[in-house]
Image (cartoon, rainbow, N blue to C red):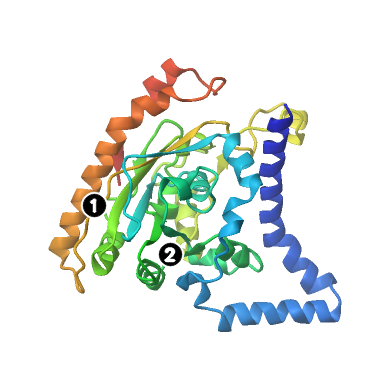
């Protein structure tokens, strides 16, 4: 009971931190803080916007101890999130991990690659990995410093190239489907935005990094979202928002707290808390890529096909096993889960 309360409390604190970054801190420093505090805040914004522009692409300001903080273990146990590897990886090599699916907010990717709660450091000793995310995440004050301390960088070409060539063992993890894939995230489905995503393959060839497919069983199960079929008003709004700011706002929902405000007011089980569904992160075998200064389209297509084939094999090999590992007390039983399981689709 106490452990569960701590897990729920941590999730609530993370939501509160995000809301504070978006609304509370900027409003406070701009409208309520004293002169010196306001000047310091504006100075920080100016410095981060015009001077410190290369930091989110170079892997600097990473503090390994931040990944080992005990509360990350509490967060991982909420679902839980677990790591499974297919083989050892040579610590002298460079690797580009492709994570699938995106889910609503990529919880499994964050816990696996930006914390040590699943034991990534012990599973793959010697790798110096950076999780890459959308550049707009580094426009927010203060949170950019937290992201960089955790070893999270922006997902630009310069960032990928710099982070893969820093040293032996330097590696990156990319949630390949991105914001577009989040719009198709639903329990029981694996619809991937991958067929035309080939930039990551090109960067692997340019740097000589090995491609490593990763599939997270359960990533799509922790949230559901309002129906948004292609052509619907909601889908068009989400796509327009993505074109404007590079991010999409999925109309998602999970569960409410047993004594939460939503349940008391509306007698609804739906809320913003993620469902307690396990996320099984399976790391596949590396695909060696020859370093090529200027890869041809033929080479890119060849290694993209190899990657997609390896990802399909990884999914088909493990999907029944890891759906059987779903924790007791999930929102539906195993028989229903097996009926709902779909073949992986590519968009």
Residue 221 vs 35, above or below: the answer is above
Q: Would residue 265 be visible to someone looking at this image?
A: yes
From the top left corner, tell me how far across and down residue 232 is, in percent: 44, 45
Closer-to-camera residue (333/241): 333
172 relative to 152 in the view: left or right: left
58 relative to 190 in the view: left or right: right
Q: Residue furthest left?
A: 298
123 relative to 268 in the view: left or right: left
Residue 155 is tagged as 2
Residue 287 is tagged as 1
Q: Which quadrant of the figure contains the N terminus?
A: top right
From the top left corner, tell me how far across and down residue 23 is, in percent: 71, 61
Residue 238 vs 77, above or below: the answer is below
Residue at the image point whose x is 18% and y is 68% from the top? 295
Comparing marks 1 and 2, which lies closer to the viewer?
Answer: 1
From the top left corner, tell me how far across and down residue 119 is, in percent: 49, 44
From the top left corner, tell me how far across and down residue 219 is, in percent: 46, 39
Closer-to-camera residue (24/294): 294
Residue at the image point whose x is 69% and y is 43% from the top? 10
Disc 1 and disc 2 in contact, CB within 8 angstroms: no
Q: Would residue 342 be visible to someone looking at this image?
A: no
Residue 61 vs 72, above or below: the answer is below
Label 2 crowd (10 A; few <14 / some 14-19 / many >=20): many
Residue at the image point whose x is 69% and y is 54% from the top? 17
Label 1 crowd (10 A; few <14 / some 14-19 / many >=20): some
Regarding mark 2 in the picture, which secondary structure is present there?
loop
Regarding mark 1 in the picture, which secondary structure is present there?
loop
């Amino acid at each position: 009971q106490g452990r569960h309360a701590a897990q729920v409390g941590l999730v609530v604190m993370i939501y509160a931190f995000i809301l504070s970054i978006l609304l509370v801190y900027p409003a406070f420093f701009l409208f309520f803080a004293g002169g010196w505090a306001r000047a310091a805040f504006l100075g920080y914004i100016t410095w981060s916007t015009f001077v410190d522009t290369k930091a989110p692409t170079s892997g600097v300001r990473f503090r390994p101890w931040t990944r080992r903080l005990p509360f990350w273990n509490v967060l991982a146990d909420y679902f839980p999130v677990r790591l499974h590897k297919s083989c050892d990886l040579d610590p002298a090599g460079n690797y580009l991990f492709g994570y699938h699916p995106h889910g609503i907010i990529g919880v499994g990717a964050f816990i696996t690659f930006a914390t040590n709660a699943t034991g990534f450091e012990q599973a793959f000793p010697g790798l110096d990995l950076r999780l890459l995310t959308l550049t707009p995440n580094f426009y927010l004050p203060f949170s950019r410093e937290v992201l960089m301390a955790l070893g999270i960088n922006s997902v630009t070409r310069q960032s990928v190239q710099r982070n893969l060539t820093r040293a032996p063992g330097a590696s990156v993890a990319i949630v390949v489907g991105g914001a577009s894939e989040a719009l198709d995230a639903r329990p029981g489905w694996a619809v991937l935005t991958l067929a035309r995503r080939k930039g990551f393959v090109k960067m692997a060839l340019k740097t000589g990094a090995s491609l490593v497919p990763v599939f997270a069983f359960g990533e799509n199960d922790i949230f559901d979202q309002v129906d948004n079929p292609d052509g619907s008003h909601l889908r068009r709004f989400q796509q327009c928002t993505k074109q404007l700011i590079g991010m999409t706002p999925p109309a998602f929902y999970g569960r409410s707290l047993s004594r939460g405000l939503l349940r008391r007011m509306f007698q609804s089980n739906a809320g913003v808390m993620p469902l307690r569904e396990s996320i099984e992160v399976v790391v596949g075998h590396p695909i060696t890529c020859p370093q090529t200064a200027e890869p041809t389209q033929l080479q890119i297509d060849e290694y993209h096909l190899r990657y997609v084939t390896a990802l399909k094999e990884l999914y088909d090999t493990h999907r029944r096993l890891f759906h059987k590992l779903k924790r007791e007390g999930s929102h539906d039983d195993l028989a229903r889960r097996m009926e709902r399981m779909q073949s992986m689709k590519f968009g």
